Amino acid sequence: MAYRKTPAEIRRLQAAREHLVVCATQVVAEVGWSQASVTAVADAAGIAAGSVYQHFPSKAALAVEVFRRAAGHEVDVLGEVLRGPGSPVERLSRGVRVFARRALENRGLAYALLAAPAEPAVGAERLDFRRRYRALFAEVVDEGMAQGLLPAQNAGITAAALTGAIGEILVDPLGASDDHSTEALLTDLTATALRCAGAPPAEPGPTTPT
Amino acid sequence: MAYRKTPAEIRRLQAAREHLVVCATQVVAEVGWSQASVTAVADAAGIAAGSVYQHFPSKAALAVEVFRRAAGHEVDVLGEVLRGPGSPVERLSRGVRVFARRALENRGLAYALLAAPAEPAVGAERLDFRRRYRALFAEVVDEGMAQGLLPAQNAGITAAALTGAIGEILVDPLGASDDHSTEALLTDLTATALRCAGAPPAEPGPTTPT
DNA sequence: GGAAGAAGTGAACCATCATTCAGACTTTCC
DNA sequence: GGAAAGTCTGAATGATGGTTCACTTCTTCC
């Protein structure tokens, strides 16, 4: 007989899928892609390994979904800051700060998104993700140049440098751990980013000598 | 009975080992760590898979050797430029150019060294490798500050930004392929790097091509 | 209530490699 | 020449981990 799923059932399935994605994201943030086996993820979500395949055709598909969600959110947040109010230089400054702060506050996830070893499907997503980040930064740099606030430069390269710098610091965080040194790190990083874009040096902030 | 290997035999074994490492490096540069199976590497070297274990106790050990060789050479080359003649700013400029040019000219290897997915043992080596790169850059930046050529800054972060920027451009090379755009890319990248370190923009004449 | 369809389970299955090892082949030394 | 020691081979072994599937449990609908 026909069997049409009741709305409640549909919702339940959606919720189960959602729960799976959320749990998988946590697992990935904690142990990285390479350790996030189907079994580990299923366990974390409280379902059997086989049930994962009710929601996704393969492990890779689940991984891509996890990545897209998390990465998309980060891009959205950064985009809002970079396209928000203020001069291009102010927005750039705030954008770098937000990007870096979010990364440092959820380092596991940030590392997974930016750098952690992953299967090819995720690697492809990551390329796109980085490209979008760079496009956002480049847009602001271009605006800054148009307004005469920034010197002539290759905005794409500046944007790549900003993304790379933040990623690099994430991977080996120079021993930052407590709140104070995190703040100092953010300040120094922002200063470096502004110099990198050629913005006139702001008021001298606290600089941690190497 | 005792059996002492004849000098010729010792040389032969050394050469075999050497040949294996060289071939493995080529394979890694071409297909990446993840595709460089023991069989693939052994085939490339013209020996049986089992013979790899005459020279290395495990695949990881071979991978580490491959990495150390290639990475060590890169660090040496960069170190020579950065510690060579010229003002800190000139050296920084030349160093970035050399680093980036070498990477772009052997992109497969550079990608393997800097970013490609790899087993944990190689990942650990890579951390060290990046740290050494950063230390070299930071040294020059510190010198530049000491001589009043560069503004006060966190040299470690600047160094990280330089490393990250070059790596980032490598991973997604902005469509550069022919010689001219590669040169343009290097020029733009060098300019970005100098800005990043806070070097006065109009200062240098045409930088010495490597 | 009960038949039919769908979702959930988890042990079995299977593909992929790193690693081993018994036997073939080579070199040393008397 | 030949025995001992070493090197080389490549198929067998073993571990890992994604995927499947026969079966159980839950939902829908009459």
Image (cartoon, coloured by chain):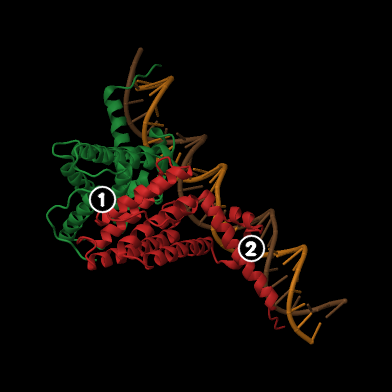
Chain colours: A green, B red, C orange, D brown
Q: Residue furthest front?
A: B205
Check if mark 2's residue and mark 1's residue have beta carbons within 8 Å: no
Is disc 2 surrounded by few (<14), some (14 to 19) or many (20+) residues within 10 Å?
few
The residue depicted at 64 percent of the width and 66 percent of the height is: B16
Residue A142 horizontal/vertical position (percent): 25, 38
Q: CA distance from mark 2 to mark 1?
A: 50 Å
Q: x, y percentage for residue B116?
A: 44, 51
**What is the quadrant of the C terminus of chain B in the image?**
bottom left
Q: Are marks 2 and 1 on the same chain?
A: no
Label at residue A177: none
Q: Is residue A116 visible?
A: no
Nearest the viewer among C7 and B19 is B19
Report in which chain the residue with disc 1 lies. Answer: A
Amino acid type at circle 2 is Ser
Q: Chain of mark 2?
A: B
Residue A63 or D11: which is nearer the viewer?
A: A63
Say if B182 sits above or below B96 in the image: above
- Which residue lies under the disc numbered 1? A196
Q: Which quadrant holds residue B99?
A: bottom left
Mark whose residue sits in front, 2 or 1 = 1
Q: Residues within 10 Å of mark 1 (few under 14, many from 20)?
A: many
Q: Which residue is mark 2?
A: B51
Residue A159 in which image quadrant: top left
- Pinpoint residue C15: horizontal percent, then vertical percent: 56, 43
Q: Amino acid at mark 1?
A: Cys
Which residue is more in the foreground, B167 or C8? B167
Name the side, left or right, on which D16 lies relative to B55.
left
Q: Residue at x 20, y 44 (%)?
A: A92
Q: Residue A179 at x, y = what percent?
A: 16, 58
